[in-house]
Amino acid sequence: MHAQDIMTAQPVTALPGDRITDAASAMARSGASLLPVVNDNRNLHLRGVITDRDILEECVAAGHAPGCLVRDHMTTNALETVHPQDAIESVLEKMESRAVHRVPEVDEEYRVVGLITRTDLLLRGAPVGSPLRARMLKRPVVPRAP
């Protein structure tokens, strides 16, 4: 099984110039906790990611104004991504190595084509009784330190 088999296709995205409040609203509407940040809505080239945690810790808790922009709080360096043909075992290894719960899926031109979460891996990629499922349940991802 490959990443493309379990991804959420065409995930909700944000632009660097979007207001944080708009990104938070998009997360609430879609149920997403991470938005890929793309250069524009046509080309969808990945520029970074913004998470609900980024918004809470880097914007709200830091006392920033509600009009601050996604580019001010998004993660841009050392992004972990996967490709449609990556094996799901490889996807899990990338998530574990970076201690993340979700990763954008990009094509060969670094355009966002999907998003994969640990829940996707658990529910759609790791059948009950499989070694991958056992591994996922035994080794939870450790959240990043504050």
Image (cartoon, rainbow, N blue to C red):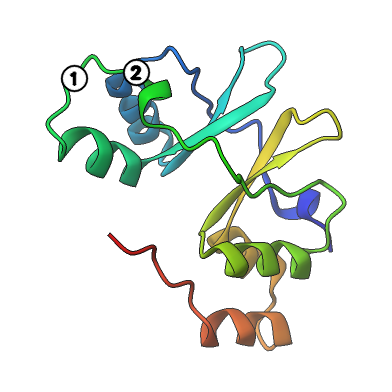
Q: At x 54% / y 62%, what residue is drawn?
A: 119
Residue 7 position, x and y percent, is 69, 48
Q: Which residue bears the numbered disc 1?
A: 66
Residue 135 occupies which quadrant of the picture? Answer: bottom right
Specify whether 11 is left or right of 124. Answer: left
Q: At x 27% / y 22%, what residue is drawn?
A: 21
Tag 2: amino acid:
Leu
State the residue lying farthest toward the front: 77
Element on which disc 2 rests: loop
Tag 1: amino acid:
Pro
Q: Is residue 115 above or below residue 109?
A: below
The local crowd at label 2, few if under 14, some if 14 to 19, many if 20 or more residues have their Cα within 10 Å, is some
Q: CA distance from mark 2 to mark 1?
A: 9 Å
Specify whether 140 is left or right of 21. Answer: right
Pick the front one: 76 or 66: 76
Residue 130 has which mark?
A: none
Residue 69 has which mark?
A: 2
Q: Is residue 8 above or below residue 71?
A: below
Q: Quadrant of the C terminus?
A: bottom left
The local crowd at label 1, few if under 14, some if 14 to 19, many if 20 or more residues have their Cα within 10 Å, is few
